[in-house]
Image: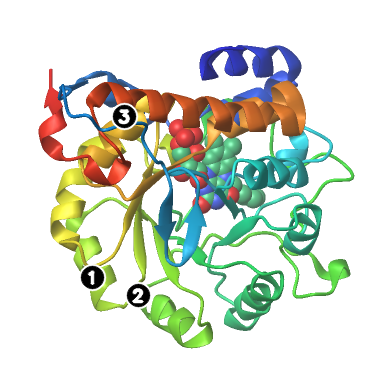
Amino acid sequence: MPAIRDFEAAARDRLDPAHYDYFAGGAGDEVTVKANEAAFARLALLPRVLRGAGSPRLGVTLLGSRAAMPVLVAPTAFHRLADPEGEKATARAAAAAETIMIVSMAATVAVEDVAAAAPGATLWFQLYVQPDMAFTEAVVRRAEKAGCAALVVTVDSPARGRRDQDVRNGFEDLPEGMRCENLHDGDPESVRPIDMSPAISWEHVDLLRRMTRLPIVLKGVTHPADARLALDHGVSALYVSNHGGRQLDTVPATVDLLPEIVAAVGGAVPVLMDGGIRRGTDVVKAMALGASAVAVGRPVIWGLAAGGECGVARVLELLRDEVEHALTLCGLASPHDLEPGLVRRC
Ligand SMILES: Cc1cc2nc3c(=O)[nH]c(=O)nc-3n(C[C@H](O)[C@H](O)[C@H](O)COP(=O)(O)O)c2cc1C
Ligand SMILES: CCCCCCC(=O)C(=O)O
């Protein structure tokens, strides 16, 4: 299959329709879901010529973690709905691509088992802070012990997004035999439901900083004022995301928000982003506008549903090849050479 669109079509054919809708869908009228992709189409690339750049090198280092390409696996829940091996298959494919997988707190395989299935994989752990901080700490300790190299704290979810299609489909819970395996304190008998709480505040970020030595990445920042506050609270990186349009509908496309956040951060910490990346040219546009790297959510799920570990590996390989090709055609030796002058709004 030559493009991520083909994987989406194959995934749609294979998945239970309610599960496809859960993966594909977003909040409200899905204005933001559509905006994320449409915004990339409105950006044009203006290549340079005769630069003698040679073949591009794609590697990046983020918070001490090395990745062979600037495309990470975003945290997404419930991989066993897409493939029986679930997050284990995704982790093996990420390891083969030598990129970073951010394991969701709502994974259907325990983080310890994900790590064991993919020795050598670079894993980061995504956390929804739970109001019970003792429980939150127990989960953080599990992630540390499993070898995760950073903590990605999702802050765009003080409540769960309203997803009409899930309501129409009656999709409320995982099927029998599947559960969120990271939602216990070390005793697998004690799995809890995720508590998305509007009480979570900057104080919790401070508590987390004192709790762990892992670098903290704040995921779901969209307002420049929050980007500045995040720096005051000592986070190690920002991750611009509107949760793939699944939380607050009508938030702008992330690639349109990126320049303001990058300006607010002023180079103090790396800025990651996700939302609507489907092509290598999208990666190049986001990095030209200041992203240190990007992440992909649904494309990985489409690969997993279409072909298990091999499907994810192919999706990541496609993106890698497309980024390399786009950089070559832009006359650049590395993603580090990208700059805003290569992008025009049309
Ligand atoms: C099915 C699905 C499940 C997700 N689960 C999580 C999650 O558990 N934690 C989280 O922080 N973000 C979650 N996200 C959001 C992704 O991390 C990411 O922000 C989003 O998918 C990026 O947009 P894209 O799908 O267009 O690449 C999920 C997204 C999808 C599509
Ligand atoms: C009941 C578990 C909720 C998991 C949330 C996963 C998620 O973030 C998503 O967008 O879906």
Query: What is the crowding at mark 1: few (fewer than 14 residues within 10 Å), some, or many (at least 20)?
Result: some
SS label for mark 3: helix
Query: What is the crowding at mark 2: few (fewer than 14 residues within 10 Å), some, or many (at least 20)?
Result: few
Image vertical order of residue 176 relative to residue 28, above or below: below
Q: Name the residue carrying label 1.
A: 229
Q: Which mark is residue 178?
A: none
Q: CA distance from mark 2 to mark 1?
A: 9 Å
User: Mark 3 or mark 1, which has the lower sequence index?
Assistant: 1
Image vertical order of residue 147 relative to residue 322, above or below: below
Res. 208 visible in picture: yes
Report the side of 144 relative to 253 (left or right): right
Q: Quadrant of the C terminus?
A: top left
Task: Kindly identify the amino acid type of the residue bearing the numbered disc 2.
Answer: Trp
Q: Name the residue carrying label 3.
A: 327
Q: Position of residue 41 (x, y in %)?
A: 27, 18
- Which of the 4 image quadrants contains residue 286? top left
Name which residue lies at 48% across and 54% down.
Answer: 159
SS label for mark 1: helix
Q: Is mark 2 within 8 Å of ligand 1?
A: no
Report the side of 309 relative to 24 (left or right): right
Q: Which mark is residue 202?
A: 2
Residue sitting at the far bottom? 210
Q: Nearer the viewer, residue 207 or 295?
A: 295
Name which residue lies at 64% across and 59% down.
Answer: 194
Query: What is the crowding at mark 3: few (fewer than 14 residues within 10 Å), some, or many (at least 20)?
Result: many
Residues at circles 2 and 1 in contact by the CB criterion of under 8 Å: yes
